[in-house]
Amino acid sequence: MTLKFYTNPNSRGRIVRWMLEEVGQPYETVVIDYQKTSAFDEWGGAALERPVLSDPNDERVRFFTQVNPMGKVPAIVHDGRAVTESAAIIAYLAETFREAGLAPTPEERADYYRWMFFAAGPIEQAVTNHRAKFVPAPEQEFFFGYGSYERTLHELERAVQAHPFIAGDRFTAVDIYVGSHIGWGLGLQTLEPRQAFSRLCRKTGKQRRFQTGRDQGRRIDSASCGPCRIAFAYALSGAENTDSRKSAPRGRLKHPSKHGIRTMATPLRRDLMRALQMVGLHHQTAWFYAAIGKRPLKVARGVAPRSRNLLSEFPMSTSAFPQV
C-alpha cells in the first residue's frame, strides 16, 4: 500500500497533513514548487503560475499530467488512484482508514457530512466574496449558494455550538476540516471573531497529532522548497500611541486596518524585497520572518518598534489558528 501526498507550503495541504498524521499511516511527501510571478495581491501574496516543464522525470510533470491537471494542491495518490479537493481527501482518508476512529458512526453521519460540505461550499464562497468586498444585493441572494455572509456565519456558529464537537461528543475528521477553515478565517480576519469559533479551535488544537503534523509540515516543506522559501511579514503602523501596541496580547496581531498589514512572499529573494518595498511605502517599520531551518530570520527596516508584543512567527497563535 502506497500513499503519496502532494502539497505546497502556501496551500491547504496543511489540513491534509494534519489528517494524515491522525490516521497514522506512512506517506511520502512531494512538494510542488510552483513558479512565482512578481504580481502581488492586496495582502502581498505572490501569485502562482503553472510551471513550464519539459523533463519527463520531473515529479511535477507527473503531477500536472496525471494527478491533477488543474495544478492545484493538496492532492493524494493512494494505491495508484488520485484524490483531490481538501474535503474529499479528508473524507476519503477517514473512510479508508476507519481504525483511526475519525469516520462518523451512523448517528454522527448526518451532521458530519452536512457541515463538512457546508464549509467546503457556502462558507468558502461567502468568505471569498466577503474578502473581495463583494456583497450581493438582497434580490441577488437567491442566485448565490450561501445567501448572505452574515447568515452563513450564523449557521456556522450554530453548528459549532450544538455539540462538544461538530458531529457529536467526540473528535472526528469534520473537526479537522471545519476547525482549519475557522482557524484560517480568524488568523486572516476573514471571519468575525466569535467565542464559539475560538472554543472549537482550542479543542481541535489539543488533538494528539496536531502538534506532530504542524512541526513535520514546517520541517519538510521548508527543506523541500529551499532554505528561505517562506517569508512572513508584519508591518507596524507608525502610530504615536504606543499604549495600543503594548495592550495587544503576545503572539497575536490586531486587525490590519489598525496596525498595518501582514505580507507573505515566496521565495525570499526578489519577492520578499518587493514586499518590503511595498510595505515600506506606507508603514514606518516592517519585520519579516523567514523559515530557515528551526531559526527565524528577522529583517528590520526603519525604526525598531518600542514593543514587540505584536510580532511572532507564523502562525500567530495556535489557540486561534489551528493550521498544520
Image (spheres, helix red, strand yellow):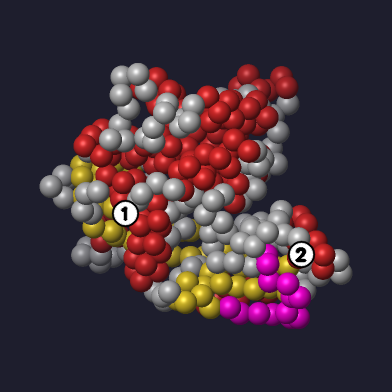
Three-letter amino acid code at the position of disc 1: Tyr
The residue drawn where x is 39% and y is 62% is 215
Residue 137 pos. (x, y %): 73, 26
Q: From where the camera sits, is residue 71 visible?
A: no
Describe the element under mark 1 as helix, strand or loop: strand
Residue 245 pos. (x, y %): 76, 64
* Tag of residue 140: none
Q: Please name the residue that numbered disc 1 is placed on.
A: 6
Select label 1 or label 2 by which is in front: 2
The residue drawn where x is 58% and y is 25% is 158
Is disc 2 surrounded by few (<14), some (14 to 19) or many (20+) residues within 10 Å?
many
The residue segment tinted magenta is 298-310
Q: Quadrant of the C terminus?
A: bottom left
Q: Please name the residue that numbered disc 2 is placed on.
A: 245
Describe the element under mark 2 as helix, strand or loop: helix
Residue 99 pos. (x, y %): 21, 37
Is disc 1 surrounded by few (<14), some (14 to 19) or many (20+) residues within 10 Å?
many
Foreground residue, 75 or 207? Answer: 207
Name the image quarter holding residue 213. bottom left
The residue drawn where x is 23% and y is 34% is 98
Q: Earlier in the sequence, mark 1 or mark 2?
A: 1
Alpha carbon of mark 1 to alpha carbon of mark 2: how far?
40 Å
Q: Is residue 309 magenta?
A: yes
Foreground residue, 40 or 159? Answer: 159
